[in-house]
Amino acid sequence: MSPLHEKLSAILTISQQMNSERDLSALLDLVAREATRLLDADRASIFLLDKQRMELWSKVALGNDEILRFDARKGIAGAAALTGKVVNVGDAYNDERFNSTIDSQTGYRTRNLLAVPLQNLIDGESVGAFEVLNKRTGQFDWEDEEVLKSLAAQAAIAIQTARSIGELTRENANLRREVEGRYSRRQIVGASPKIQAILQLIERIRDSSVNVLVSGESGTGKDLIARALHYSSPRSRRPFVALNCAALPETLVESELFGIERGVATGVNPRIGQFQAADGGTIFLDEIGDLSLAAQAKILRVLESKVVERVGGRTSIPVDVRVLAASNKDLEAEIRKGTFREDLYYRLKVIHIHMPSLREIREDISLLANHFLAECCRDSGKQLELSPGVLRRMSEADWPGNVRQLQNEIKRLVACARKPVITEDDLLEGIPEADPKPRRESTSQAASLKNAVESLEREMIGEMLRSTGHNQQKAARALGLSRQGLINKIKRYRLTQFAR
Ligand SMILES: Nc1ncnc2c1ncn2[C@@H]1O[C@H](COP(=O)(O)OP(=O)(O)OP(=O)(O)O)[C@@H](O)[C@H]1O
Ligand SMILES: [Mg+2]
């Protein structure tokens, strides 16, 4: 074998090594080392091209961890990177393309150098340059050019793989941080003693994997709490699998939860179940009160044995899963009715968190309203404020849909806002949620005919709005009023959910 052939076959061996190196800076080190050896050079540097800034940068050139950056339009490496051609210079200081500032920065004296472009093999685009300095004996010749080109081609592939892996890893870490931030305890807003106690409890159990049952009316934040429990636990880097039990048809419960083996029936694909998918992490069984007794028995068995058996399978698969469950039903009442298993209830309820209705934490309404306002403003790019009057009315209103309803109301107000401050008047538009408790006492207390008439009017309008599903057109017609007349009266009597 000729010396050139020997070198080229050595490159193939090196390239295998390069392709298994995932860390970009270790890879660059390896390539530079091999280049120095194969080309009998004193130094080797790999420069990557930063197209946006038209700069070349390198970590290796200085032999330490400092990064060298310079204008790609100056210097020999830049010439190779930008023209895509080999540049072989026998006497550096007599070549006008040579950039001697690097030598003065590094204290190195370049005599001769060879630079080849680093090209992306798919589209031939230049991604940088590969440069060797100071041949130990004589000058770099055409064989050296062939060797360096071949090494550069292999290195380009490995560099791209390492870079995209690095980018993916970074992207993944960013995404994870985003998800963790979105579901962290910090997103739970509330200064009331009830919410503060819940936050403290979450903090206290963050290192344990106990099962938690979250109860509470619809829209009180059960989902939010379940995610916060998972993302503040040591399991946060493992899956969070949420399953809505109410949406699970009886016939699919088993295969969905535990998986299904190959060959169970024709046309049925094997797959893993949700318990296995959540292995090492958390499974969130939402609306658990809607599971059939049969399904409850199956879940209880998994909680007790910590293994799952796939449908049609004969082996037990061990699973390590924390179970969080939520329900807006009163499970103790379900137990009395015989529709929920008591033993399962106690397994799930190692810790019980009851989410208060919004009526019970009125002191948090302003805080929540402003929190949602900030969120909506961020999404829509608007800058809005809630007037003190609006906040007061919101704090006094009844919110049967709890926090979710308040959140939706803020979304609506932000979408409809035409001025920078949202005032009480804005509440009256389009939300004719009549007062569910008409003020009968004012009838008895009516001091005058006028008061009595107003009181009666208010009751009749409220009643009509409720019975028409808040359709102003229908309600106005039934009451013998014009639509505008009705709206005026709604305003006058503050007949919205915000009137008490
Ligand atoms: N204390 C809180 N702080 C901030 N946001 C909250 C709070 N409580 C609830 N939310 C928000 O209100 C909305 C409804 O909450 P969530 O979906 O968790 O309620 P839920 O109890 O699971 O409702 P459902 O019973 O209907 O499933 C979500 O957007 C949630 O982020
Ligand atoms: Mg929910």
Image (cartoon, rainbow, N blue to C red):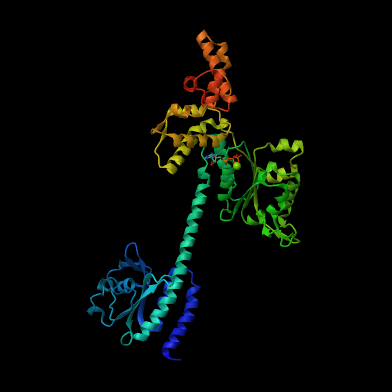
Q: Residue at x 67, y 59 (%)?
A: 271
Choose between 451 and 113: the one closer to the eye.
451
Residue closer to the observer: 50 or 325: 50
Picture quarter containing residue 247?
top right
Q: Give x and y (percent) for residue 486.
A: 50, 21
- Residue 66, visible in the rendered structure: no
* 109 lies left or right of 465: left
On the image, the x and y values in percent for residue 121 come to 43, 73
Camera sees residue 397: yes
* Residue at 56 percent of width and 33 percent of height: 358
In the rendered image, the vertical position of residue 440 relative to residue 261, given as above or below: above
Residue 286: image x %, image y %? 64, 44
Q: Is residue 145 left or right of residue 283?
A: left
Q: Taking 473 as reference, is 335 left or right?
A: right
The front one of 230 and 482 is 482
Tell me where residue 8 appears, x and y as whole percent.
44, 84
Q: What residue sits 58% from the left and 37% below the top?
A: 220
Total marks drawn? 0
Image quarter where ligand 2 lies: top right
In the picture as drawn, the residue positioned furthest to the top comes out as 448
